[in-house]
Amino acid sequence: MQGAIMRGLFSLPDPVAHTCPGSCSWHNREYVSLGFSSQCQNVTQITTATAQCVKISSGQNCTFTTPGNIKLQAFIIATDAQTVVHVAAATDLWRSSSGAVSPKDFVRFGILRIPNGTFNENGTITTIWGQEFMECSISLTAFKYSNITVNGTSISPADGVEVPLTQLSQPPQDKYYIFNETGLPSFTVSSLDWFAISQFFISNQFSGSIVIGDELMIPDMSGIATLPLFKSPDIRGTFANMSRAMTLQLRTSAPGSQVGFGETNKVVSIVRVSWVYMILPLGVLAASAVLLVATVAANRRSRGVPLWKYSPIPLLYHTIREQDGVITSSYQSPVGLDRQARTLRARLE
């Protein structure tokens, strides 16, 4: 799950969660999965009003409290050091023995971002200004997926329809949380797994701050979330990517996950023949066959005639009978004509 959180924070590609040789579909089928959703809102105005600042040498150290009761700190020392981002998280999950737990907003985050060099000097007091406060949360929720199609590595729809979980049917003093929502299958969540996720978020592996300036006075408090959240142009989008990656990880690797079998779509070429348009070519073919047979039959009486070579020599030995004008020759076979042609010598005048 930590790997999925990092993929979402740094916008890394997700692993392919399906096996499809080309184009596949899961039509007329609905799948339900447990997952995570996120919400974010800008709380700069209301959080700035909670500032409690203590003057330090050439600057001040301020503590802010978000509407979700998350403490954020920042300090500025003119020309020396300045906090540029602080990320903190809080959870009420360990209060589960009293029943004060809900799948909604089980982890809350506060993000303070201060652009580099944004401070004012009012006499001898340096005040922080230009800061931005964001408050986000991650919730357990259910997703419905239907009419799924895959083309290569692209899956549509990529995100299912979110169904909030509100019915905790079993008191959470045992090892599992059980959620029974109307129209959904029962979801069983391990309390240890849920607790481990929340503790990772509130630990200094995830949360922390970045201070720029004098290296001698900068503590090492930077978690993995500080840099991507400081540089993110859209914190809402970053948390949405993180919750989506966590949902994919849970959907594909959680115990009890089931494989959904779909259908492969293949492109097949189909030729549609209109037989009425075949009458003309078939008729021409039949007429040609009849003509060929008739030609062969009409020339059967000439089959005893010997073949003559193509040559102008026979014309030299033909004469015209004056009484009837018929061209005739005294040679009746090519053999005699050929013999005579070999001995003939003539001169053109």
Image: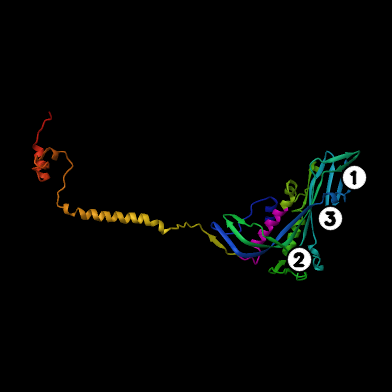
**Residue 71 image position (x, y, % from top left):** 83, 53
Q: Is residue 344 visible?
A: yes
Alpha-carbon distance for marks 2 and 1?
46 Å
Q: Horizontal placement of 189 versus 336: left or right?
A: right
How many numbered discs? 3
Q: Is residue 243 magenta?
A: yes
Query: What amino acid is at disc 2?
Result: Thr
Quarter-wise, where is residue 163 in the image?
Answer: bottom right
**For the N terminus, which image quadrant?**
bottom right
Q: Is residue 218 visible?
A: no
**Residue 127 image position (x, y, % from top left):** 87, 43
Q: Nearer the viewer, mark 1 or mark 3?
A: 3
- The residue where tag 3 is placed is 67
Residue ID at (41%, 58%): 276
Q: Nearer the viewer, residue 158 or 85?
A: 158
Q: Nearer the viewer, residue 87 or 44?
A: 44
C-beta proximity under 8 Å, tags 1 and 3: no
User: Which sits earlier in the primary sequence, circle 1 or circle 3?
Assistant: 1
**Residue 315 image position (x, y, % from top left):** 14, 39
Residue 109, numbered circle: none
Query: What amino acid is at disc 1?
Result: Lys
- The residue where tag 2 is placed is 166
Give the magenta range: 239-258
Residue ID at (68%, 60%): 161
Q: Secondary structure at mark 1?
A: strand
Quarter-wise, where is residue 203 in the image?
Answer: bottom right
- Label 3 packing within 10 angstroms: few (<14), some (14-19), many (20+): few
Residue 55, numbered circle: 1
**For the C terminus, which image quadrant?**
top left
- Label 1 packing within 10 angstroms: few (<14), some (14-19), many (20+): some
Q: Nearer the viewer, mark 2 or mark 3?
A: 2
User: Which sits earlier in the primary sequence, circle 2 or circle 1?
Assistant: 1
